Amino acid sequence: MADGAAPLSAASRRDRLSALSDDLLHQIITQYLPVTEAARTAALARRWRHLWSSTPLVLRDAALPEPARDALVPRVLAKHAGHFRTVALHDLRLASLDRELPGWPRLVAAKHTQELHLANRCQANDILPLVPADILRCGSLEELVLGSWAFPVDLSRGAGVSLPNLRQLTLAMAAIEDRDLEHLITACTALEILKLAGTTAKRIHLCSPSLRCALVMLSRDENLAVVDAPLLERLVLFLPATPAVVKIDHAANLRVLGHLNTRRLHRLQIRDTVIELNTMASTSTAIPSVRILAVTVNFVILREVKMLASFLRCFPNIDTLHIESALHDPSVTANEHSAELHASFWQEASPVECLRSRVKKMVIHEFREDQNEFEFLKFVAMNSQELQSLHVVLQEENTSSTGKVNDTREKLQSLRFQTGVSAVLLVLPKEDSISIMQKATDLTFDDPFRF
């Protein structure tokens, strides 16, 4: 004892931590301790011996030391006596796990796992392993993330899928046939959130009575059709630089949609009508439920500008509009029309109902400071009767000088809007794709496209 220090009383020496309830100690073990440290709590005192084995396991391989990871994962899975709450293996060495713990998929299912992440460590040309059948019949699962797996062919004709409690499904780099993906989605009768990031399916059909949110990253030559999704509120798209078709049939509750893309390679089809440059507003081409819309457009290309107007006519009730100004490709834009023709188009364009009487908030993302962008904003200024806020966002990475930013701010302030609002210029860093995806599938965010 240090000189002058008071001796510890019996009360202060008492193990107050062990006096806590089992529920609180379970939370401490699962939320604040790495799995290896949590396992060691059994040696602390008799009071703690049953806690580790009775606490639902939370195992994340990212929290394990790299050199010992291959050995620790099967050991923890095999020795834990209680249920599994979360097993997240984002750096899965499948061969090692199969060797050290044969039958691990059956164990994961038998332990009533609720959240399961399995991402294989694969090279570009590797043959993807098949998803174990026990995983597809794990009835306790509420969230399933699969990365770099192949699905059995004729999935609907085999032992089938039984995931009655699954609320969230994520497939990344998955080899799966069109009909098998459709069967998988349909078979998950409680599914609310779906994320598809690179599959081999060429036609993705969303047909689900429970689905509320879908994030779809289309790959080369994929087509997406919302066939029948009555509860779908949010459809977030990442479109490729190759041909793609987005078709919306039945989605009566769709509130949030984007990013649509005006490129020639991309097509939007509403029910039986492909939206073209001359498509006029009608009940057959309108989706009146959408309130938040995001569109990507290259303002240098007049055809894309005209397509923007056609798209907007299909969504008469949007109150928040996000427009991302696409990067100008010199090889494409070299022979494009002059700013005068762009100005003439907007002066002669027939009314766009949502801009005139609905849109209250507008954000122009990745503003390029091009004259054609200003021509569009002039059209908005002259026609918008409900606009309450306009934010124009410059990317920090594309901002060359303070002087140019000030020039852009002055040009924006010179615009006179019917509602009296003024454009607000912001200089922000480009948002990373992971953050965008997280917001897209977080239903607590009313607007996943906001900066």
Image: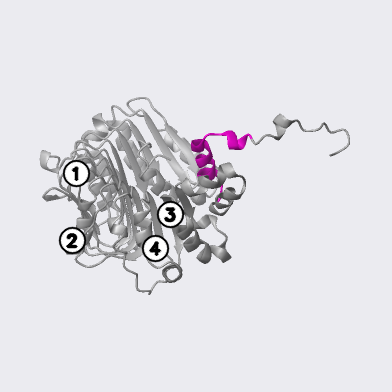
Kind of residue at badge 1: Pro
Image marks 2 and 1: residues in contact by CB distance under 8 Å: no
- The disc label shown at residue 44, or none: none
Which label sits in the foreground, 3 or 4? 4
Q: Tell me the distance, in whole angstroms, between the alpha carbons under discs 3 and 1.
A: 28 Å
Residue 416 versus residue 187 in the image, above or below = above
Q: Which of marks 3 and 2 is nearer the N terminus?
A: 3
Q: Tell me the distance, in whole angstroms, between the alpha carbons under discs 4 and 2.
A: 24 Å
Kind of residue at badge 4: Trp
The N terminus appears in which quarter of the rendering? Answer: top right
| Magenta-span inclusion, residue 19 | yes
Disc 1 on helix, strand or loop? loop
- Residue that mark 4 sits on: 104
Start and end of the magenta stretch? 16-34
Q: Which of 424 and 268 is in front in this view?
A: 268
- Residue occupying the point 61% across, 36% down: 17
- Residue occupying the point 14% across, 43% down: 285
Disc 4 on helix, strand or loop? helix
- The disc label shown at residue 209, or none: 1
The C terminus appears in which quarter of the rendering? Answer: top left
Residue 389 versus residue 327 in the image, above or below = above
Q: Earlier in the sequence, mark 4 or mark 2?
A: 4
Is residue 66 shown left or right of residue 11? left
- Residue that mark 3 sits on: 87
